[in-house]
Image: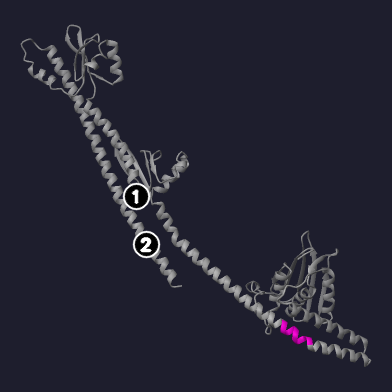
Amino acid sequence: MVTFPLLVWYSNHLMDKIVHEEQRKTRIWADAMQRKADMVTYSNEFFATIAKEEELHANQIGKAIIKMATAKPSEDLSFYLDFLTENQTIPLILTDGKGNVIETRNLDDTYLNRIDAPDKLQHVVLEENYIVLPPIHYHGNEYLYMYYKESKIYTQLREYFKDLIDNFLAEIMDNAPSLSVIVTDSSQQDILKCENIDTTRINDPQYVKNLISSMSTPKNPPIKIAIGDSSAYVFYAESSILKIMRLFPIILISLFCLFLTIAYLLFRFARRSEQNQIWVGMSKETAHQLGTPISSLMAWTEILKNENVKPDILTEIDKDLIRLENITQRFSKIGSMPKLEMENINKVVSDFIAYFKNRTSSKVKFNVYLSENKIDVMISKHLFEWVLENLCKNAVDAMNGEGVISVYVNEDAKYIYLDISDTGKGMESKYQKNIFETGYTTKSRGWGLGLTLARRIINDYHRGKIMLKNSSVGKGSTFRIRLKKGMA
C-alpha cells in the first residue's frame, strides 16, 4: 500500500521534469524563431533600402541625360558620360516622343527585338512594370522619355526574400518541439500554417477561433513576428504526449481504486460464502436435532388420543406438530436450491395469517386485503411462509405486542406485490439501509438473521425482491415483496 503513493509521487515528479524540459525547449525554440524573424525583418529593410537606392540612381541618370541634352557646346560633359557609362545594373530605355528607342543600357540584343516598335515597347513597359521618368526636354517641342525597372540583382534578392519568408514559416513548423503550433496573420484569425492539430477542421471558423483562444494564455503568449511591412503571430500549446502524461496519475489512481474495489468485492463474496456455509451447517444441524423430539411428540399425541383428551386440544397440538415439521423442512432446505411449485398466493397468505393470528396477542389486529383475482406464482411454500413469519414477528415486536398489521396483495401485468405494514415505532433513515445486513438488529436479544434469511429466500431462491418500502418514526414500517407472475 505504501508503494502506490510513492509511485504516484514519482510519476508526478517525472511529469514535472518533462514539463520543465518541454518549456525550456519551447523557450529556446521561441527565442530562435524571434531571432530569425528579426533577421528576416532586417533583410526586408535592407532590400527596401536597395530599392530606394536604385530609384535614386535612376533619377540621377535621368537628370544626367537632361543635363547632356540641354548643355552648351562648350560645356564639359565628361562627368555625366562617365556616370551614364558606370551604370551596369539598372535596365534603361531612352525613347523619343513617338516611342522609338534611341538608346538602352543593360539589355541584351534579344531583348531589343521585343521593343523595336512603339507598340511593342508599350506592351513590355506595362508587362514588366517599368517606371517612367518625367519627360526630358531637349530642343523646341521635342522630348525624350526614359524608362527603367529594378535591376536583376534586386529582382533576385526579392525572390530570395520571398523564399526566405516561406522557408521561415516552414522552419517554424519543422522545428516546433512536438508542440501544437499555428501561425496566423496580423488579425490573429486566419491560419497561414499549422502543425500537430486537427487539419480536418481547419476550415471551421468557430473551431479556429476557439483553438486560437485556448492557445493564447499568459503562460504561452503568442510570438509576434515582423516580416517586412506585415506581421504574423505564432501560437503554441503543450505537446500531445505531455497531455497524455498528465492523465497517467489519474489512470493510475483509477486502476488502484478498481483494484481495491475488486479486492473488497472478493473479500465480501468470500465472507458471505463463509457465512452461508455456517448458516447451512447450523440449519441442517437444527433440522436434524428437531427430528427426534418431533417424532417423540407425535407418539405422545397418539397416546393422548387413547386417554380421552379433549379433541380441541389434540387438534391444536396437531397444528403445532405440523408447524414444527414445516420449520424442520425450512431448515433442511437452506443451502440447496428448493423446488418451486405453483401456488395461489391469496391462499398461502390467508392460511398463514389465520395460523399466526391464533398464536399472537389479542391486542394485535390483522387486516388482510387480498386480490380479487386468483394469482398463481412459483414459490417454495415452506420457505415463503418463513419470510412471512419473520416479517410479522418483527411487526409485532415493533408494536410491543399491540397495534395493527395490514397485509396487501396486489398485481400488475408483470409482477405481484405483497406489502406488510405495521403501526409500530418505525426506523430512522440512517438505520434503514442496514436492516438486511447480517447481524444487524435493533432488539436487545437476537442474532439479526431474520431479514437476512428473508432476503436470501426471496432474492436468491425466488428471483424476486424484498425491500423496505417506507418507514417513519412513530408511524410504522412497510415491507414489500415483489415476485414475477407465473414463474419466479
Residue 430 horizontal/vertical position (percent): 62, 73
Residue 460 horizontal/vertical position (percent): 70, 70
Q: Quadrant of residue 20?
A: bottom left
Where 130 sits versus 197, above or below?
above
Q: Secondary structure at mark 2?
A: helix
**Which stretch appears magenta?**
284-291
Magenta stretch containing residue 290, yes or no? yes
Q: Which residue is mark 1?
A: 177
Residue 58 horizontal/vertical position (percent): 19, 22
Which residue occupies the foreground of this view, 54 or 22? 22
Residue drawn at x 29%, y 34% as measured from the top left: 163
For the question of whether residue 475 can be seen, the reply is: no
356 horizontally vs 120: left or right:
right
For the question of whether residue 408 can be seen, the reply is: yes
Residue 145: image tag: none
Q: Quadrant of residue 230?
A: top left
